[in-house]
Image (spheres, rainbow, N blue to C red):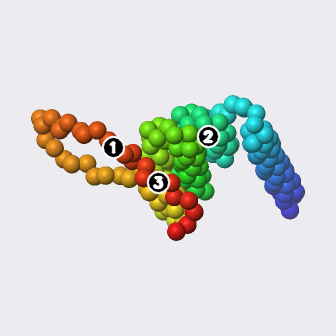
Amino acid sequence: MRWRGPLLSGALWGLLALALGTCAACAGGLLLAMRDNRLIAGLSAGRDLPVDETAAAELRFARAHFLMVRDRFEEAQIMVDRLPPGRNGIAAAAQYDLANARLRAALSLLEAGRIDAAGALVRLAKDGYRHSLALDPGLWDAKYNLDVAMRLVRDFPQIDRPPEEEPPELPVRLWSDLPGLPRGLP
């Protein structure tokens, strides 16, 4: 019976150490989440805060959105491409968000009459919507916006030619690739 006392005491000390370790881990996770939330709030407020590559995916998405809103698409594309696919749909949402930002920029270029620059942005937006749908096929908004972008700039199939043939001289374009701006639902 004497052995039960030290054994029980050792087990209790072990449980206490385990509980303290668990509390410390939870407190550390809480502090990291609070720091991430402060950084996300700062980015939402318009402050240009740096984000580490090892930060949480949500924080990197917030940084990418900050860059998208300011038309810094190349930097945002790098952030979006580095998001892990399949994690809560963040990568698909980020691709969708970047495609939307590019489409908005293209529409403002269209309103300013810069059709060629707008066409390039619309093509990039279509690629973004397609990539978003590859990550999350059920993303209905991406399907709808892809349809709108497809109406703005059409994709024509490329003719396969042997490499030794020279492409024929292209005639002068009499109209643009942008036949019209769809406004609203049909």
Does residue 10 appear in this view?
Answer: no
Are the residues at dot 2 and dot 3 in contact (C-beta closer than 8 Å)? no
Q: Please give the residue where the numbered disc 1 appears in the rendered image.
A: 174
Q: Nearer the viewer, mark 3 or mark 1?
A: 1
- The residue located at (46%, 41%) in the rendering is 115
Specify which label sits upstream in the sequence, 2 or 1.
Answer: 2
Q: Is residue 14 above or below residue 63?
A: below
Near mark 3 (Cα within 10 A), the count class, few <14, some 14-19 or many ≥20, is few
Where is residue 69 drawn, in percent x and y?
65, 40
Specify which label sits upstream in the sequence, 3 or 1.
Answer: 1
Q: Quadrant of residue 34?
A: top right
Give the numbered dot on residue 180: 3
Per the image, label 1 sits on a secondary structure element best described as loop
Q: Please give the residue where the numbered disc 2 appears in the rendered image.
A: 68
Q: Nearer the viewer, residue 18 or 8?
A: 18
Per the image, label 3 sits on a secondary structure element best described as loop
Q: Is residue 51 above or below residue 27?
A: above
Where is residue 16 drawn, in percent x and y?
84, 51
Cα–Cα span, label 2 and label 3: 25 Å
Cα–Cα span, label 3 and label 1: 15 Å
Q: Nearer the viewer, residue 50 or 133?
A: 133
